[in-house]
Amino acid sequence: MKSRKIVFAAPWKTELAVEEVETAAVPENALVLRKHFTLVSAGTELACLSGGESWFKLPGVHGYTALSEVLAVGAGVKDFAKGDLVFHYGNHREIQVVPTTDLVLKVPAGITEKHVPFTRMATIAMTAIRVSGIELGDAVAVTGQGLVGIMAAQLARLSGGEVIALDPSAQRLELARRCGIVHTIDPSAGGVKEKVMALTGGAGVSTYIEASGVPKVFIESLPLVGKGGEAILLGSPRGEYPVNATELLNYSHLWSHGCVTVKGAHEWRYPVKHDGFVKHSFERNSRIVIDLIKSGALAIDPLLTHTLKPEQHAQAYEGLRHEKEKYIGVVFDWS
């Protein structure tokens, strides 16, 4: 069966190619899936498209979140049938053969199909909430209001936090407000600490989540954290940033600097499939997010800025790279 795919051919160069996928003999415990929608993960995919990520070799096919239709099932598959719609960690290719050992979840009727791939971005963001100590009424700051950052802000709010979103982009702050975040601050306007202290009665935030992936932002935002608070790295730090390590360590060590606890929130700290020995997993988090999306508790519409055909791959990645304020949630429609 012929299948289109978006290939990262060389640094900053994408191509649409066609491949032949063997679907006549389906592996016993596998599914043949046809994509309906895939979502671009801007931070990770642009880093890979730049050629700067050693773990991703060019040329290659990226992407890791999709809504697909089951075309065929292997003889050993019991829980899926032809025609089922599923969420899975699918890449930017039209037809994909996926083992059932991977995370594949049926999606409920009544959910907006284009919203489903956003599940992965929300579960990435949920890791920060899982490792945090956020309780009802806590002040929470989130720097970086891209897809993951706005998801983290929404999930912190749903967990009871009083959320402050920070980003130098007026458009992104407006998106955050449309997603229910009341307090927004543009750091480029200055006076960030004073504004945060005014919103928190002088105490600072008890939880700070860094979602931009810019090391400088993390370091410069530590003064926003109150005594005994926590600073959480959600966005993967990229790029060099010279800093006085002693000053940084004192934020964690000295009470005068807040005794701030620094935590990592990379999603792979949890297992993919759920079992009785763990509370959190990709599977459980995904089911929770899908329910939040269907109910409308997690706002997706403001974040879905572009629905493009795979043939418009160049527009998608050039927009995400050069027009970051306009291109936020970019979905490929494979129909």
Image: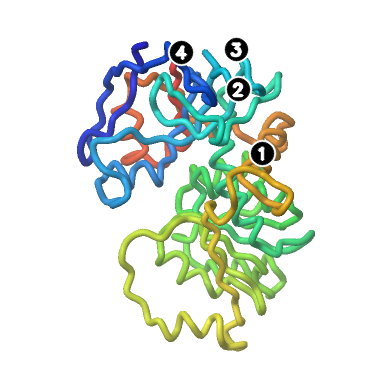
Element carrying mark 1: helix
Seen in the picture, residue 28 relative to 202 is either above or below; the reply is above
Q: Earlier in the sequence, mark 1 or mark 2?
A: 2
Mark 2, residues whose alpha carbon is within 10 Å: few (<14), some, or many (≥20)?
Answer: some
Residue 77 circle label? 2
Verify CB contact (< 8 Å) between mark 3 and mark 4: no
Can you tell which of label 4 and label 2 is closer to the viewer? 2
User: Residue 12 in the image: x percent, y percent?
Assistant: 23, 39
Q: Earlier in the sequence, mark 1 or mark 4?
A: 1
Which is more toward the observer, 231 or 270?
A: 270
Q: Quadrant of residue 245?
A: bottom left
Which residue in the rendered view is the most extreme toward the right?
136
Q: CA distance from mark 3 to mark 4?
A: 15 Å
Can you tell which of label 3 and label 4 is closer to the viewer? 3
| Residue 185 seen anywhere in this rendered image of the structure | no
Query: Would you name the residue on which mark 3 appears?
Result: 83
Element carrying mark 2: loop
Q: Earlier in the sequence, mark 3 or mark 2?
A: 2
Q: CA distance from mark 3 to mark 2?
A: 14 Å
Q: Earlier in the sequence, mark 3 or mark 4?
A: 3
Q: Earlier in the sequence, mark 3 or mark 1?
A: 3
Q: CA distance from mark 4 to mark 2?
A: 26 Å
Residue 289 circle label? 1
Residue type at numbered disc 3: Gly
Residue 335 circle label? 4
Mark 4, residues whose alpha carbon is within 10 Å: few (<14), some, or many (≥20)?
Answer: few
Residue type at numbered disc 2: Val
Residue type at numbered disc 1: Val
Can you tell which of label 1 and label 2 is closer to the viewer? 2
Which residue in the rendered view is the most extreme toward the left?
10
